Image (tube, grey):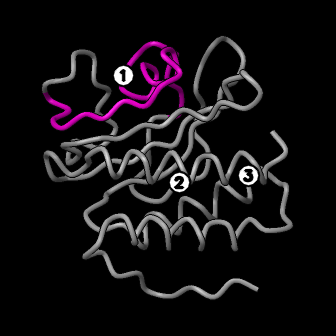
Amino acid sequence: MFHLHTIDVADKSAFYDELAQQVRALVAGEADAIANAANASALMFQMMPDLNWAGFYFLRENNELVLGPFQGKPACIRIPVGQGVCGTAAARREPVLVEDVNAFDGHIACDAASRSELVVPLVKHGRLIGVIDLDSPHPGRFDAEDQAGIEAIAAIYLAASAV
C-alpha cells in the first residue's frame, strides 16, 4: 500500500530518488495508463516545489498530443506534434528544457503565469506514447537534475503502464 510522505528538497538527487520510489509504489501492480498518469501527475505536483502545472499529453490520431491527467489550471487540449515545447519534445523524441518560455519560438501559452518548462517524451518500444509536461511560474526553475529525475519517473510510468 502506498503512503504519501514529505520529501526533503534540499538534496535534489536524493529528492528524485525518493520521488521515484513513491511513483514506483503508486503504480505497483496497476497497468492502467490513465490511472497511473493521474497519480503520477498528482504526486509530482504535490511534491515538487514551484510548479503551476504537472501532467501528461498522449499521442492520438492526426499526429496530435491530447491532454491527459494533470494538476493545475485548465490546459490546452490539443497540441500538434512539432509545435510548442510539448510538440517539439514529441517530434524530437528527446527532452526539452526551457529556462524562459518567452524566449522559446512558438511557445504555446496555456497559462500565462508559466515562465519555464520541462517536457520529457514517453517512448516505449520505439513508439511515441506522449509526454510528461511540467511548468513553473519561475524562470530557470528546471535544470539537468530535474530532467534526469523526470526521465526516471517516465521510465517507471512506462514500465508499469499498458501503453
Q: What amino acid is found at the position of numbered circle 3 in the picture?
A: Ile
Image quadrant where one finds the N terminus = bottom right
Image quadrant where one finds the C terminus = top right
Circle 2 residues within 10 Å: few <14, some 14–19, many ≥20: many
Mark 3 or 1, nearer chain start: 3
Q: Residue at x 14, y 29 (%)?
A: 102
Looking at the rendered structure, the secondary structure element under dot 2 is strand
Q: Residue at x 25, y 34 (%)?
A: 98
Vertical arrangement, residue 30 with respect to residue 115, above or below:
below
Does the stretch in magenta take in 113? Answer: no
Instruction: Please give the residue where the numbered disc 3 appears in the rendered image.
Output: 34
Mark 1 or 2, nearer chain start: 2
Q: Which residues are magenta?
A: 77-102
Instruction: Please give the residue where the numbered disc 2 appears in the rendered image.
Output: 70
Q: Residue at x 31, y 35 (%)?
A: 97
Mark 2 or 3, nearer chain start: 3
| Residue 86 coordinates in the image, percent (x, y) | 44, 28
Looking at the rendered structure, the secondary structure element under dot 3 is helix
In this image, 10 relative to 93: left or right? left
Label 3 – label 1 distance at C-alpha: 23 Å
Instruction: Please give the residue where the numbered disc 1 appears in the rendered image.
Output: 84
Q: What amino acid is found at the position of numbered circle 1 in the picture?
A: Gly
Is mark 2 in CB contact (under 8 Å) with mark 3?
no
**Quarter occupied by residue 88:** top left
Vertical arrangement, residue 34 with respect to residue 103, above or below:
below
Q: What amino acid is found at the position of numbered circle 2 in the picture?
A: Phe
Looking at the rendered structure, the secondary structure element under dot 1 is helix
